[in-house]
Image (cartoon, rainbow, N blue to C red):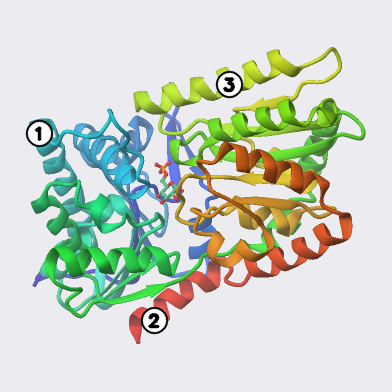
Amino acid sequence: MASTHGAAEVLVASNRGPVSYVVGDDGSVETKRGGGGLVSALSVVEDKLWVCAALDDGDRAAVRRGVSEPGVRMLDIDAGVHADAYNGIANSVLWFVHHMLYQTPLEPSFGPEFRRQWASYEAYNRAFAEALAEEAAPGATVVVQDYHLALVPGMLRELRDDLRIGHFSHTPWAPVDYFRMLPDDIAEQLLRGMLGADRLAFLTRRWADAFTECCTRIIGGTSGTRIGVHGLGADADFLRERAHRADVEDRLAALREQIGPGRKAVVRVDRTELSKNIVRGLRAYELFLETRPEWREKVVHVAFAYPSRQDLAVYRDYTAEVSRVADAVNARFGTEGWTPVVLHVKDDFARSLAAYRLADVALVNPIRDGMNLVAKEVPVVSDDGCVLVLSREAGAYEELGEDALVVNPYDVSATASALADALAMPADERAERTKRLSAAATALPPGAWFLDQLHALRD
Ligand code: G6P
């Protein structure tokens, strides 16, 4: 037991926090606020402490100067340790395992380099556990987020037996035979680390069951840890208000002009992320144009693919491939007055909302995805109804599957057919489906999602 304790009653821990800092040449510090789903979900609890990591030199410089935001403690973890833990283990190993992204001949070899990075992952998790142990009031509630921090519950339990500890996974969980690709001792350590929590939670029953199965087969059970499911929904009030502000209207007008009058729009919005399956989506659209020539010049694929994790070569290569394939489709089918694929890579939330509003079809075809909030946000803000083409491997399928056109994400031919069916759907059916999708998508808004977890944890 730690001899000292802090004053925070509710603590949240995640790699990426709600703020980041930019330090100017003149030494001035600019604070940038993140607008992600977690930020809005957690805003329902005012009095909380958010423990996060410094992610770059700006953050580190700010922390070293003593800059801090109320309610946020940013940890200045050694840059090399953080890079090993975040890029090496979290994003290149754990993300790949849970999204089943390793493919022959690129399966991993877990040798000395992996062991070195794993030691950093442990150190990084320990830094979080120690900070949480220091800040938490007696009997406080701590909610740890995601695969970056899988060891924190167990480490924190050893330091502070009095806390209520929860852990939430925003990713899928790998099936046991795939999870066992990890070295045996590491697989065990991860499971036992998470089971240090009082309660673990997942986005869908499917991921929760996969975790339970891993525990049963690898370590003989979940040793009394409770396991729950909270399907994060879209924030309807926020989205509807935000989607009608002037900046979105401007972008809507610009997009309409780019698409051209009378044409339909197939929209996708993603991080340029291997699991999002953007290239197969482009190939499906290409096949659709090839096999349904009557649609040429009448439809535009508006693809937003925002750069992500560019420290990793495999993500840089994938980003380049997305551009290459989009260019190839345009070179093959484009005409004087028609660009079949409009690809935007600069992250712009207002423009994403504009695309949601005008989409006739939304293509959400990940090969695996914890939830996928785009699938939930589009029906909520759509102006005239939108047909959702949805991968059965997205967590959102559990709630939206009935009113979407569901595809196997590897099946490019079936995806091409689904695009054709979606574009041909009668307006009244499309409107009915959109209404039901929107209701299902907003069943558990972010604030309620977080409060439900807190209540369940304290029960
Ligand atoms: C997605 C995933 C989360 C993950 C996050 C990290 O949103 O659904 O599970 O925590 O990416 O993204 P980052 O850009 O911080 O690596």
Please state the horizontal and vertical placement of residue 93, each as a whole percent of the image: 26, 41
Image quadrant holding the C terminus, namely bottom left
Q: Callout 1: helix, strand or loop?
A: loop
Q: Which mark is residue 111?
A: 1
Task: Rate crowding at label 3 as few (under 14), some (14 to 19) or many (20 or more) other CA atoms within 10 Å.
Answer: some
Kindly identify the residue that appears in the image at 33 percent across and 30 percent down.
57
The residue to which callout 2 is attached is 456
Q: Which mark is residue 206?
A: none
Image quadrant holding the N terminus, namely bottom left
Q: Distance of mark 2 from mark 1, alpha carbons?
A: 40 Å
Name the one closer to the observer, 371 or 329.
329
Kindly identify the residue that appears in the image at 48 percent across and 64 percent down.
42
Q: Amino acid at mark 1?
A: Gly
Asked where in the image residue 90 lies, by quadrant, the reply is top left
The residue to which callout 3 is attached is 325
Name the mark nearer the viewer: 2 or 1.
1
